[in-house]
Amino acid sequence: MANWLTTREAVKRTGSINGDSQDAIIDRIIEAQSRQIDRVTRRFFIPRTETRLYRWPPILSFGRYSRSIVLWLDQDLLSVTTLQTKAQDASPTTIAATDYFTEPNNLGPPYDRIEIDQSSDAAWESGDTPQRSISVTGSWGYGNDTRSAGTVSSGLASDAAATSMVCSDSSLIGVGNTLLIGTEQIFVKDKINAALAAILIDGALTATQSQVTVTVDTGHGLVAGEVIMVGSERMYIEAVSTNDLTVVRAYDGSVLAAHANDTTVHVFRTLTIERGINGTTAAVHANAAAISVYEPPFDIVDWCVAEVLAAYAQHSAHWGRVAGTGEGAREFATRSLGGVRKDMIGRYQRLRMASI
């Protein structure tokens, strides 16, 4: 699993789905719908580093020049690391960055072609295997926009193979996000609650929905948007004022309960992760290393949420036309979603292009 176009939290929040009993199903549907959007648009919305091979293009004539000039690409290109021709030969030819252009220059990235600089001596050459003669290594995808998402608190400082890390602010990271730490991409598979040192509630809480102020000890470091767990009750932090937290009690389907003074506060900051995805390499990262989160276009994220919720509703109805019984029965209709699909495909679908 990787490269989700939305998060588990976004789907559950939009669909008012509580509890964790459906998390595995939701995760599978997000994965499936993300890949479906990739397929119908013919794009990657989370960038990846890889080498792609292309056939030797035909000779194009420009004035006094008569040689291979343009390489059309079948995927969005963000940047080139290495460009080689005669790629299958024992000694490929590397084309210098000064001898080619990524185009369209005024609109990209992403780019849809590479053009040899006509004032250079470089050219595409067929080599031993014309159908695989050109090798382009670089970053591929529709975009590589990111946002800041706090820092690494622990877990990655001594082990490049670690599959768990603690972040400084869990409100900025969701299950399904792709993180960028240094040059490594990391996929967030799950969030786990763990006790943070010396964070206790300061004053007993009653099992009352209206008691929404939770006082905690000094130095807690909690922020609005995080989810905490006191006993077995989850609480969503809406606001923080010094040591007073304004919370939503019995959050995410948990049970409202009373809590004694000095009960330990657990926070969902421990992330279960998949390392070195999308062609990047797992590495050691120091504590306080900056974390960024890749952000696909906002309307792509919304489209994915809509597709996931439609598929989840159908799954819940066992793929029938009607869910529920009696007065609560309702028929599924996805006509409006069909309009969204048509609009988004028209907006984002990439034309098929290749060297011929």
Image (tube, rainbow, N blue to C red):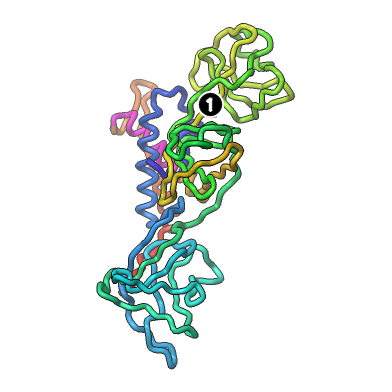
Residue 313 among those drawn in magenta: yes
Task: Say above or below: 56 vs 146.
Answer: below
Query: Which residue appears at 49% of the width and 63% of the height?
Result: 79
Q: Quadrant of the C terminus?
A: bottom left
Query: Which residue appears at 42% of the width and 54% of the height?
Result: 44
Most common SS among magenta residues: helix
Q: For residue 120, say whether it is visible.
A: yes
Residue 172 among those drawn in magenta: no
| Residue 200 position by quadrant | top right
CA neighbours of label 1 inside 10 A, class few (<14), some (14 to 19), many (20+): many
Question: Residue 18 at x, y = what percent?
Answer: 47, 24
User: On the picture, is 93 further left or further right than 264?
Assistant: left
Task: Say above or below: 263 vs 109.
Answer: above
Residue that lies at the very extreme toward the right in this rendered image: 242
Task: Say above or below: 278 vs 214.
Answer: below
Q: Nearer the viewer, residue 121 or 3?
A: 121
Q: Quadrant of the N terminus?
A: top left
Question: Residue 161 at x, y = what percent?
Answer: 42, 38
Query: Which residue appears at 55% of the width and 9% of the height?
Result: 257
Q: Identity of the amino acid at label 1?
A: Phe
Question: Residue 131 at x, y = what percent?
Answer: 27, 71
Query: Which residue appears at 65% of the width and 14% of the height?
Result: 201
Q: How many marks?
A: 1
| Residue 212 position by quadrant | top right
Instruction: Tell me the magenta residue range.
Output: 304-318
Q: Which residue is mark 1?
A: 268
Q: For residue 10, say whether it is visible.
A: no
Secondary-structure class at tag 1: strand
